[in-house]
Image (spheres, rainbow, N blue to C red):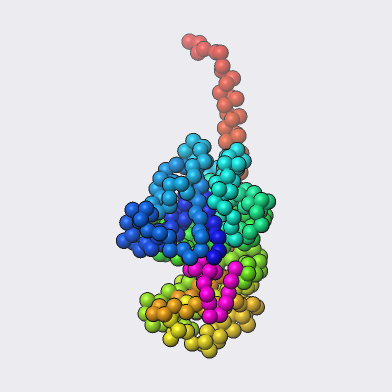
Amino acid sequence: MLNILIIGNGQCGNRILDSINRHALGGGKSCGRLARFYSRQRFKSRVETLALNTAVNDLKEMKFTKARDRIHIEHLHGVGANRNIGKQVFEDKKERIMRQIEERGSFDIAFLITSASGGTGSSFTPLLVKEMKNRYNYPVYCLVVLPFREEGTLYLQNTAFSIREIRQSGADGMILADNQYLKNIGGSIQEAYNGINDMIAERILFLLDALDSEMMMVTDLGDFKSVMSGGAGLATMGFFKSDRETSIKTAIQSTLSPAGLLFSTDVYKEASRAMVIIKGDRKYLNVDDISDEIEKLSRAIGHVFKGIIVRSGEFPQVLSVLTLESAHEMEKLYSVAIQAIQQEKEKKQRVEKEAELDKTFSMIEGLEPEY
Ligand code: GDP
């Protein structure tokens, strides 16, 4: 049995964590509010979840995460997308945060979930990774959500800096999910968020299930670590869940296709290592077809680990974890972020000019109009 820690930082991290808990509690959309009190989590592993936030309202909004797992790190009403304030709050409250982790025992693996662009999650996450890597020797992976590109200059610049800091923090890998890429899920912004959060939750839960399952063909935590250590420190995940009889070839292709991935990439060109886990009734799992598809991928990228979990009566489901050796979309994001930083810089200079104007105004200090 694996001991797994999942931490959601900031609003986005909290919401995705809540979605994970909802699914783990057996929650489809009909799962009621009281489920958290009456159902037992369906995790096979021992999973501890922890939500950290400076904004108490974000924590209150969570419905499926126990109250003792929602930790308010007091700072007024949040840090207002200012990562410098966020970092300072983390440093001030570090021991309190670390005590929360300590109290939950020891772990084999940890996942930290955050948006790259906000204030709290994006500033806490790199510092928390660094602290955890100093104190513990289990791997720490970050799941990082990228912003809609039209959300503004502050979010874009936060993204550029936080991604770099997470890479430098000692994290064992970073799994990307891109709001911009996933936004065509449709509906209102809240519906889009919920849809994206569910997609991420579904993939994480499948992964946890797989890491702790008896498999016909084995992939385990060791293989996951090997996959995540490949490439340029960036990864993404693909998933396909069939609700009817689907050929296993189609299921594997779908998990690697744009519709299945959380981040825009051509896996055959940009992936570096992969893990493909297939679950379903034995009658859908034609081993030759599976090998054909896996070999196609490994010819293009190098090494692919494969795992098969037999679940009688279940239609095929496939999860892929792919590390990337290049990420064209990330390069595009950084060039937009550089423009955003420049824009903010120019704005600041303009504000400084305004301060000069204040000096001009203050020249009449102490004088009265004479008529
Ligand atoms: P923080 O609370 O200060 O860490 O800030 P947020 O987590 O709210 O970060 C803002 C970013 O997160 C923006 O790019 C939002 O689009 C994104 N975001 C906020 N809530 C959600 C959510 O529920 N799901 C997803 N996918 N993204 C979210």
Left or right, residue 63 beside residue 153? left
Res 331 → quadrant: bottom right
Asked if 149 appears above or below 316 in the picture, the reply is: above
Asked if 241 appears above or below 157 in the picture, the reply is: below
**Residue at the bottom extreme?**
288
Which residue is at 57% across, 77% downward?
218
Left or right, residue 14 beside residue 82? left
Which residue is at 59% across, 60% downward?
109
**Residue 13 versus residue 312: which sits nearer the camera?**
312
Q: Is residue 207 magenta?
A: yes
Pinpoint residue 31: horizontal percent, then vertical percent. 33, 59
Which residue is at 53% across, 77% downward?
215
Q: Do we see residue 118 in this rendering?
A: no
**Residue 128 versus residue 252: which sits nearer the camera?**
128
Asked if 324 appears above or below 253 in the picture, the reply is: above
Which residue is at 50% across, 51% downward?
50
Quarter holding the N terminus? Answer: bottom right
Pinpoint residue 249: horizontal percent, then vertical percent. 48, 84
Res 367 → quadrant: top right
Q: Do we see residue 362 in this rendering?
A: yes
Pinpoint residue 186: horizontal percent, then vertical percent. 38, 63
Pinpoint residue 338: horizontal percent, then vertical percent. 61, 53
**Residue 23 versus residue 254: which sits nearer the camera?**
23
Q: Is residue 59 magenta?
A: no
Q: How many marks?
A: 0
Task: Give, as a single range, the part of the protein colored magenta.
Answer: 205-221
